[in-house]
């Protein structure tokens, strides 16, 4: 019988190491006098930092930032696969077929990037991902028979999405097909928080949703925000690279975020919808720089699924997107314009 030989840091703990560095870096070298609020949302540590701009007093700004954090709660109740009270759970369970605009829009993004990857990324992976528990005290590889059975319900092309006149969407899907938006939801939520902050005349700051980083506005043209990207499997706060960003998003997806070892083999949370097992393609991390965080979130997972060569080919075909691919042996491959963002 197989057994877990070594337990590694959970996603939240790994992100906390990175987040701690990032936020300290922001306080000491990026934001001269920011107001910051933090919390535990979306199953990870999150933070929103901003300058006291727009005539806001510090107390007023802090309340606005707290309200921004509560946006995470609103969307988690819409996008969660596991919460029985969430809209997505009810959709997966067959209780409803009509969903709010935001959920339909996010599903639409998922279908778009599944098409872009020819199904290497698939938001109907939920029947399989629900078998893998990377947060357990004793994580283990599911029975292969269970995985093979769950795979029969994975196929994003069976989803039918129709936008209604009132802005809602109708979702038609087979029974037992489970939509899982965990790979792309944080980017969408980060964009919504940025829109909220801009509406409140807060135009300089940083949104960090567990490592999904979105820079709001510009710090200055000659002194941009500095964003550290975590070195895969590192337990210290020394970044692999540091990015210089203004009004951009940086999103990473990697096999070091949630993983465990069993019989000496690494199992991580980015699952191949063809096999039901984690991807094993020589990649440790993909980081995407983009204008919209949802774009970066979708592409980081999509490019990880495609692998370095096909992922780079995809990135080079897209305008305004740059990427960094970290291989399992530590070597790094950059898209043609990525170096312009390196410190």
Image (cartoon, rainbow, N blue to C red):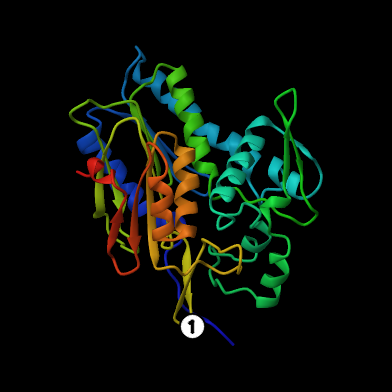
Does dot 1 land on a helix, a strand or a loop? loop
| Front residue of 165 and 32 | 165
Q: Is residue 261 above or below residue 205?
A: below
> Which picture quadrant has residue 23?
top left
| In the displayed structure image, the side of residue 175 where residue 328 appears, left or right | left
| Front residue of 184 and 68 | 184
Q: Residue at x 32, y 49 (%)?
A: 335
| Quarter of the image with the C terminus in it | top left
In x, y percent, where is residue 294? 49, 39
Q: How many marks?
A: 1
> Which picture quadrant has residue 128?
bottom right
Q: Is residue 223 above or below residue 317?
A: above
Q: Residue at x 63, y 46 (%)?
A: 80
Q: Is residue 314 visible?
A: yes
Q: Residue furthest top?
A: 55
| Front residue of 36 and 291 | 291
| In the displayed structure image, the side of residue 299 where residue 88 appears, left or right | right
Residue at mark 1: 263
In x, y percent, where is residue 1? 59, 88
In x, y percent, where is residue 293? 45, 38
| In the displayed structure image, the side of residue 36 where residue 219 appears, left or right | left
Question: Are there few (<14), some (14-19), or many (20+) residues within 10 Å of tag 1?
Answer: few
In x, y percent, where is residue 181? 60, 48
């Amino acid at each position: 019988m197989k057994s877990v030989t070594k337990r590694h840091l959970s996603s939240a703990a790994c992100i906390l190491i990175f987040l701690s560095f990032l936020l300290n870096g922001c306080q000491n070298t990026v934001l001269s006098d920011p107001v910051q609020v933090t919390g535990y949302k979306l199953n990870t540590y999150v933070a929103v930092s901003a300058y006291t701009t727009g005539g806001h007093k510090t107390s007023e700004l802090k309340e606005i930032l707290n309200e921004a954090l509560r946006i995470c709660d609103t969307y988690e109740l819409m996008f969660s696969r596991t919460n029985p009270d969430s809209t997505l759970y009810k959709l997966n369970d067959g209780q409803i077929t009509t969903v709010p605009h935001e959920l339909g829009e996010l599903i639409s993004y998922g279908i778009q990037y599944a098409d872009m990857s020819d199904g290497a990324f698939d938001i109907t992976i939920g029947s399989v991902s629900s078998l893998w528990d990377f947060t357990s005290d004793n994580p283990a590889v599911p029975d292969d028979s269970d995985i093979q059975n769950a795979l029969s319900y994975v196929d994003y092309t069976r989803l039918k999405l129709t936008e209604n006149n009132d802005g809602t969407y109708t979702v038609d899907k087979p029974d037992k097909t489970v939509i899982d938006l965990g790979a792309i939801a944080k980017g969408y939520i980060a964009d919504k928080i940025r829109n909220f902050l801009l509406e409140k005349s807060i135009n300089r700051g940083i949104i960090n949703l567990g490592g999904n980083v979105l820079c709001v506005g510009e710090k200055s043209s000659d002194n941009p925000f500095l964003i550290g990207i975590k070195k895969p499997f590192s337990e210290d706060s020394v970044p692999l690279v540091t990015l210089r960003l203004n009004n951009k998003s940086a999103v990473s997806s990697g096999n070091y975020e949630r993983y465990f070892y069993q019989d000496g083999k690494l199992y991580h949370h980015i699952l191949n919808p063809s096999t039901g097992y984690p991807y094993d393609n020589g990649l440790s991390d993909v980081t995407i720089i983009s204008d919209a965080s949802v774009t970066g979130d979708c592409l980081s997972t999509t490019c990880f699924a495609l692998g370095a060569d096909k992922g780079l080919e995809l990135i080079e075909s897209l305008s305004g997107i740059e990427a960094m691919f970290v291989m399992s042996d530590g070597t790094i491959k950059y898209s043609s314009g990525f170096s312009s963002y390196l410190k």
